Amino acid sequence: MILAWLLLIPFIGGLVAWLADRKKLVDPALVTLATLLLDLLIVIGFYFTRDAPIEISGQQWMAVLELAWIPRFGIGFVLALDGLGLLMVLLTLFLGVVAVLSSWQEINHRKGFFYFNILWTMSGVIGVFTSLDLFLFFFFWEVMLIPMYFIIGVFGHENRIYAAIKFFIFTQASGLLMLLAIIALVYFHHQSSGVVTFNYFELLGAELSASVAYWLMLGFFIAFITKLPGVPLHTWLPDAHTQAPTAGSVILAGVLLKTGAYGLIRFAVPLFPEASAEFAPVAMSLGAVSIIYAAAMAFAQTDIKRLIAYTSVSHMGFVLLGVYAGNETAARGAVMTMLAHGMTSAALFAFAGAIGQRIHTRDMRQMGGFWRSAPRMGAIVLFFSVAALGMPGLANFVGEFLVLLGAFKANMLLTCIAAIGLILAPVYSLIVIQRIFHGKRLVEKPIPDVTTRETVMMLMMIVVTVGLGVFPQPVMELMASSLDLLPVVAFNDEAGMVSQ
Amino acid sequence: MIAIPVEHCLLLSVMLFCLGLLGVLVRRNIIFVLMSMEIMLNAIGLAFVSGGARWGQADGQVMFLLVITLAAAEVAIGLALVLQLYQRYRTLDIETISKMKG
Amino acid sequence: MLEFLWLVPLLPLLGFLLLVLLPLTKRAAAIVGVGSVGAAALLTLLIVVELFGLSSDAQVFRQIYWTWMQAENFTAQFAFYLDPLAAVMMAIITGVGFLIHLYSVGYMDEDPGFARFFAYMNLFIAAMLVLVLGDNLVVLYLGWEGVGLCSYLLIGFWYDSHANGYAARKAFVVTRVGDALMALGMFLLFLHLDTLDIQQLMANANDQWQTGSSLPTIAAALLLGGALGKSAQIPLQTWLPDAMAGPTPISALIHAATMVTAGVYLIARTHELFLLAPDIMFLVALIGATTLFISGFTALVQTDIKRILAFSTISQLGYMFLALGVGAWSAAIFHLMTHAFFKALLFLAAGAVILCVHHEQDIFKMGGLRKRLPVSFWSFMIGGLALVAVPLTSGYYSKHEILFAAAGNENSGQLLWLLGVLGAVMTGLYTFRLIFTVFFGEENTRVHESTVGLVVKLPLVVLCLLSIVGGWFVLPLDHVFPASEEQAISGITSLVTDVAPFVGIFIAYLVFHQNKALADAVVAHTPGRLLQRFWFSGWGFDWLYQKILVNPFMLFVRINKNDIVDSFYRLAAWLMRLIHRLFGLTQTGRMQWYVGSIALGVVLIVGAGIFS
Amino acid sequence: MTAEQLQALLPIIMMASTSVIVMLVVAFIPRHSVISSVTVLGFILTFASLSWTGEVGQGLQVTPLIVVDRFALFYSALLLLASLVITLLSFNYFTKGSGSENQVEPGEFYILLTTATLGAMVLVSSNHFASLFVGMELLGISLYVLVAYLSHYRQGRQGSLEAGLKYLVLSGVASAILLFGIALLYAEFGVLGFGQLGALWSNIGALNGIYAMAGLGLLLAGICFKLSLIPFHMWTPDVYEGAPVMATAYIATISKGAVFVLFLRFFMVSGAFMQEMANNLLILIAIASMLGGNLLALMQSNVSRILAYSSIAHMGYLLVVLLVANTGNVPVSTISESVGFYLVAYIITTLGAFGVMAVRSNMLDTRDTDQVADYKGLFWHSPWLASVLTGMLLSLAGMPLTAGFIAKFYIITMGVEGLKWLLVSTLIIGSAIGLYYYIRIIIVMFMRHDEEPITGKRDRAVSTIDGLVLAALAGVLIWLGVYPGPMIGVIQAAFPG
């Protein structure tokens, strides 16, 4: 039941926050914060008091909840939590807290509705990370979009409607493809086994002909790569990020993008191992292209949030590369990159928001020389920029290093191309510092330095980033069993091998 | 009694029906449009009756009765609306009712 | 004391954290900043003494702290490895680092970013120590990137100027090119040797790889890439002259004494791998020789005092690479050390000069400073003599070891030696061009002496001493490196090598002191001017990179700012709207048109039915 | 006629009597509230009588014309509830005009609602061409008047007149086409019952006579018109826009629903879908409707027209299910179940959407509140109303949490099981296009008034009845979206025969 509560608490909290605002009882931001902290406490408490793991089809699960839902189609309400899911849920709730803190002053009207949407997004995302019935998964997958759509479309910046609609259509349309793939998978599984079920564990062993599996895998892949996002399906992201309010960007970058990666790890590859193996070179190429292309695009931007958005695409390219590299090293790296990117991009977006609030623009051409009046802010942004460019000792490095190390085994050529990303990363990361904090001051009024609230928020994230960078091993142990299904086939691209 | 071949009757009814449809298509006067619809309904009636005759059943005639009822009801409402149209625009041209489009 | 090894990098790191987290006064910042490095230096001294007290076979100490990363067969421990090589490096870093920290207290006295400066410096020392102590390549890489970051931060320390920021980013990105290659090298090594622990790696490489086979060659080439970037060798040398934008103590510490030698350290550390790749060894030597030769000429035509020293650094690093390439490992490290002393001295002295002439760096706007700034002058003189390798100075011993080793190399040794000797001539030439121009001749600058206090002078004096006596140290590296067989050096070779620096000094005396018109006359001719400009630009490397790498990238980026991929979706959306409009046209509002549509549909259906 | 048959016919009889009683009430007690109450009572009683009729059991043929089975009863119940909702929502729509000099007691509106519903009930119980004809015309002729109902008000509603005339002529032509098709089939085969026709077809295999083919084609064309499938769709937007919003809701839900149910029964009982020709044509029509409907709706600024075009697409989606039936991969019961669920979801959703529009409209205005701009910022002054409309639009778009999602899930499942990949792909593309215009309306409702001035007009308070009805619709929408099991059970039981 713990799993159901995880979902329900933000769900109910959202309603409470909205009502509290309408009746002018309490600040909905407080309600939201309390809800998320409660949920976080429950997860942590659960982690330390959990019983012996439950074993289903060879995998270890910390908690499983299975209820009948729509028996007509063999659809169950199946929630389960393993190491990977736990990490993702923790990340979600943590960044939820950050999102609330970062929008504390930004959102002043319609607060109730805003926090209602934040909490419902959280609920949907936790659903995505815990559901193990494909129908239920898709259900949450779509449900989390709607509040996000409102966050962007209602509370965003000047061009928000375009951005919100673009976001919605990209993710929805690709989602429909996935729905088709899910239904087809169930159908073909039914054909071969005589059982109609959407249960993940049962579908894992579905017997599919090679071509069918390949098509179905593509359906999943397109949905996930859109969310990830990978080139060439990434173009919704810069717009969505640019227009979203700070909390929206934080959640979008920190959490929502991870659902795409999570989907690849949990569903796309394990459900179709052979097809994925066959497809891996293409997926890895897309990953490598994403890394480089988005890095170059990031450098071109003058809008700070747009820039950070492209860096997200670049970083998620590493995840794509890692997931399809087909070995555990790269897979661990991919998950580490997800966590690390969650921290750094969320922090950078929080700061873009903080700066935007202070000077009312996102255009970096109108910034410069902020270090003089806001050195602490500069130092913190510097920290996260440096983390983003993959400085060893910080979280991103662990992820990227392991991804490349693992990917090198699978495909040398693509890894070499991806390594160009290591060169381009400082190009775009450092330009942020240069344009905003260094150089001559362009704005007359000195901008105020970080407030206590912002400092606390950032310290939390710094501690996590450093912690993950220096002591990543406990986290990697936690995710280990979840990745068992991933490296199904070691695929070596002979063409990329150096002749001995 | 020498039976009229059913094909002849049906051919006639088809021609009548097409005439009616053509009338609806080309006439601009609403009254003529309604009249053309009557012709179509009568063509249907003829087809039913000839069908009934072919199979020696009463069903065809029954259907014809129903068609006549329909025609009457349609014309009744049609004429009421024609009155409205005329009162408002002082014309019977159906081009006047083409405001809604797109 | 060995078990306190972990404390050596930790002390400056703690200093960094204190400086960053606490709002310290200037005095407190100085105490924390200098004190932490001082303590580290002291501790290093104790550790080094203890280490060398051990028998020469047991001079190895490994400390494992925790498992950093582990996945499948890959394990990276967070561990330090201390051997004589690392100990020498540690001593140089903490020793020279401490002196420069001390000097900085005076040099940076009036700077508003005082505490920030020391924070970065402390972080640098910590990272550099991690680099040399790293037991495996991943920990080494941690330090490697860490020093790069600090280098970036300190080059761009005065952030108001865009040029400084540009120089800083250039330094980071260019070295990052090397870093990426090095990372690939690590992947390759791990893929085939299953470990990244340096000692194990070397052992496995020796076991599994044939000398001269392709894998060690590629792996060594990739590692060399990293070394070239860090140590500013051709073709990745272009960042170092620009890096002089940072405060002068930084140039002394990072861009002369320590960080730029990391490449040398890396190759020395992995010399067993390089020994398996003789082609790459030769490449290293060739690159070193070319670099020293080319940058000698470049240094000759520079006018900025720090840029002259920067090109000189590149040139001296070239000597070290030359040494590495010919297998004279100890000589390379020896030169690394002496160079750390005299080049730090030169930079610090230059800094003192710059400070006294109101941050003027153009040598032709100085002159006759010998009388006004005696401490700086004598420091410069001693440092310069060591740099040109005049006998009895430290540079003489180390450079001669290198040149002799080069001469004795069976692989085009004569060519390498010749380049080295020509470089030595150039060294004398440009060094004394600098000295004659700045310290002799007429006075043409206002000078204020007052700012140079004791904290500035003391490090200068100590470094002067080291620059002289440094050559007498015997580095206990025999057990680290394979012994190189003694080469029989012909008398001629020896003589030429000895005389070369004096030739340079003599020419400098003629052209830049005795008859200044001569230099102007050379430059007055078109070929001369073109050559001068070519040399001045660093042999056109910057220009070339700008044209073939930076400009195309910028062009792509500028053209594609709005993301060409998105236009595909915009086109699709536009197409949809177009179709919508076209379809909308059918909805005319005319009833007869609608009837027509129905009739058409009927005709189609019935027609299809009848004719199917 | 046996007592059992009478019992079976009771709902139809009840409905007919309701018409008569309402007519009498209009004549003698012409007060809006009384008329409305009586109508509501009539619907409720008829609905109640369905449960008693249900005891008759499986498929009772009452004369050759009417069959009373669970299928008919289920859809009668659905249509009755929909009519009830429309009646309830109409009350305030017409009351808003009261007090002004134009005050009219809209009694005839209620009479026509009852007769139309009677027609619809006959239609869903029909398995004979004669009853089909009677039901369809009863429904159709009532609708002509409902559509044109506001045309006689002095100062406005030209749209109502235009829509009425267009609907009259176009629907008249379509009815004629359908009837002519029936006439030709009759002339060819001499039977009027669906079952008899099917038996004859299965004897001769494929159709080959010119008249038979033409007859079937004409029949199809007539039905396609009623369902507004491309290329017979053109009346839809104009009529939706011009008709009073409740009449629009009636056409969109009950009329289309009843015709589709009839279509389904005709196909299932007569086996017409086994005809190659019908199948191929319908595939083309379905594809055209799914794409065309969504594309036509894309940039519309009028909500009624958007819903009209979207209904074209939705009927196209439904057609996919019928086409799957042809493959024989899927049991007929599953086909019926899918159509049933889709219709339930679609009717609830459409009623909800038009309901919100009705609550915000006034019959005395020159038009209903149907411009997208009228909904600007609605959420900020009428949050519940906007939430309901949001839910309905999301359901139309097929988003989870709503009934529309389960409905779309059914269709895709059918498409996959029938291996109709082309149709399913088209459906996906169409749905993706459709997202745009649904969420555009939603975003307009949520526009912040602190930046944009509210152009949408403010409303009077929503009356209790309207509020309850809309809340109930929204509740059912969510319930079906989250826990559809029970409803699936009910629909599974409603199988023809």
Image (cartoon, coloured by chain):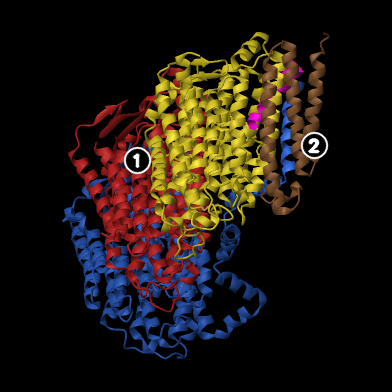
Bounds of the magenta segment: D208-224
Q: Which chain has been coloured brown in this picture?
A: B
Picture coordinates of residue D286, whole percent (x, y)? 62, 32
Does dot 1 land on a helix, a strand or a loop? helix
**Magenta span includes A389:** no
Residue beneath label 1, please?
A127
Picture coordinates of residue A307, whole percent (x, y)? 47, 59
What hue represents chain D? yellow
Q: Determine which of the numbered discs, if any, sits on residue B23 in the image.
A: 2
Quadrant of the image occupied by residue C11: bottom left
1 and 2 marks on the same chain: no
Which kind of residue does numbered mark 2 sit on?
Gly
Residue C41 in sight: yes
The front one of C400 and A21 is A21
Q: Which chain has been coloured red in this picture?
A: A
Asked whether disc 1 touches disc 2, contact meaning CB atoms under 8 Å apart, the reply is no
